[in-house]
């Protein structure tokens, strides 16, 4: 039956055309954005998971940047220490020469003074990211400066909880100068241990006694009390930065004490440099692992929300063809009502 009020064929053709247009819009959006899920409306579960992974990748990227800054500080401190160790070797050589009775101590002292000046310059200018780990000021109370540096090393998510892991670097094992005004120096246990180890290594049974002075500062500006067996109770109070082999009371035993203090200090700094090297290697490894996690997350995000462009482009072409056929079908359905008019002529 043909009705002039209701055109069932046209209605069906229009419904089909609407469905085709909806699919065409969806497919066109996927082709243009490259995503099959670009909002929660496209798939709430996958969209939520992908959004979380994207957020985590942002945190991992920030972590990687922070680790890069930490590595820069470590590498700067390591470079400074290596220069200082070279100069301490020069001082040790000069002290060895000074033990000879024919040595010109004045000229050797000049070499020592130049090396000490270079050490101070290296230490004061080893600055990275606004901080210096070689020349510090632990404060009047001895607690204002924190010798333990907390370096970021990892970011992880467990369920709905995120964790940021840190690795502790004890800079007290290689701090060179501490300009604290506290009468007893700093209260860092690592510094105290390092100074004690230097004094122990510098003691020569029966010839010279070395003890850490009352004020503990950096490894180079802490004063050591040096007692020579030849002078009995007469003792010298000197730090590495103030070594003077031309001073009164400096005999062969005191020179030996100086030599052993400098050598033990250099060995302590070598240990500190190895700690820095190990920490730099660790952060490099963690940074590479962080990048791998970011790549895995990107792959996971892609598998969840990315569109198959080959499939979608093929589907787009088919839908465009269906759209044209739908328009033609609707046109034919509409023309059937016009045919009824011929009956009234």
Image (cartoon, rainbow, N blue to C red):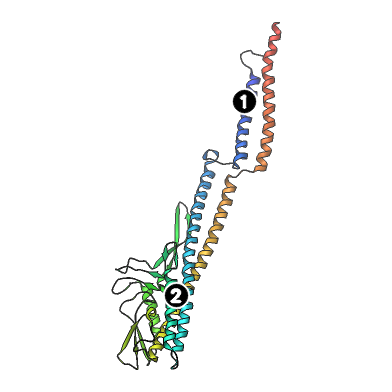
Quadrant, the N terminus: top right
Which mark is on residue 118?
2
* Residue for badge 1: 15
The tag earlier along the polypeptide, 1 or 2, is 1
* Residue 331 position in % (x across, y down): 68, 21
Can residue 1 be seen? no
Query: In this image, 262 relative to 18: left or right?
Result: left
What residue is rendered at 40% in x and 88% in y?
A: 255
Residue count near mark 2 (Cα–Cα under 10 Å), binned few <14, some 14–19, many ≥20: some
Image quarter (top left, top right, bottom left or bottom right) of the C terminus: top right
Q: Residue, x 49% and y 78% (percent of image)?
A: 86
Residue shown at 40% from the left, 91% from the top: 252
Q: Is residue 318 above or below residue 118?
A: above
Q: How many C-alpha atoms fall within 10 Å of the one at disc 1: few (<14), some, or many (≥20)? A: some
Q: Is mark 2 on a helix, strand or loop?
A: helix
Rounded to the nearest angstrom, the CA distance separating label 1 from label 2 is 87 Å
Q: Nearer the viewer, residue 299 or 198?
A: 198
- Horizontal side of 250 relative to 50 (left or right) equals left
The picture quadrant where one finds residue 207 is: bottom left
Q: Give percent across and percent down for residue 311.
A: 67, 41
Residue 149 against residue 241 in the figure, above or below: above
């Amino acid at each position: 039956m043909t009705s002039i009020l209701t055109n069932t064929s046209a209605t069906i053709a229009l419904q089909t055309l609407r469905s085709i247009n909806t699919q065409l819009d969806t497919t066109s959006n996927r082709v243009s954005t490259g995503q099959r899920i670009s909002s929660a409306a496209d798939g709430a579960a996958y969209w939520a998971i992908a959004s979380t992974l994207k957020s985590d990748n942002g945190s991992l990227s920030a972590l990687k940047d922070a680790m890069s800054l930490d590595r820069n500080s470590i590498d700067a401190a390591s470079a400074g220490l290596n220069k200082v160790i070279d100069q301490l070797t020069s001082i040790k050589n000069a002290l060895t020469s000074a033990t000879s009775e024919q040595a010109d101590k004045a000229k050797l002292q000049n070499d020592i003074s130049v090396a000490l000046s270079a050490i101070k310059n290296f230490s004061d200018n080893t600055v990275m990211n606004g901080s210096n780990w070689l020349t510090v000021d632990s404060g009047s109370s001895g607690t204002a400066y924190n010798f333990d540096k907390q370096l970021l090393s990892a970011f992880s998510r467990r369920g709905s909880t995120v964790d940021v892991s840190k690795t502790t670097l004890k800079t007290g094992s290689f701090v060179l100068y501490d300009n604290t005004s506290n009468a007893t120096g700093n209260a860092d246990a690592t510094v105290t241990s390092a100074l004690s180890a230097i004094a122990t290594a510098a003691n020569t049974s029966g010839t010279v006694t070395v003890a850490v002075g009352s004020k503990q500062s950096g490894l180079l500006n802490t004063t050591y009390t040096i007692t020579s067996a030849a002078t009995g109770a007469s003792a010298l109070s000197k730090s590495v930065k103030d070594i003077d082999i031309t001073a009164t009371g400096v005999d062969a035993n005191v020179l030996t004490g100086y030599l052993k203090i400098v050598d033990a200090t250099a060995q302590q700094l070598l240990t500190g440099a190895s700690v820095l090297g190990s920490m730099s290697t660790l952060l490099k490894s963690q940074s590479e692992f962080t990048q791998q996690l970011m790549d895995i997350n990107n792959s996971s995000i892609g598998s969840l929300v990315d569109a198959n462009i080959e499939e979608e482009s093929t589907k787009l072409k088919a839908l465009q063809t269906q759209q044209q056929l739908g328009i033609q079908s609707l046109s034919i359905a509409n023309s059937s009502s016009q045919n009824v008019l011929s009956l009234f002529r």
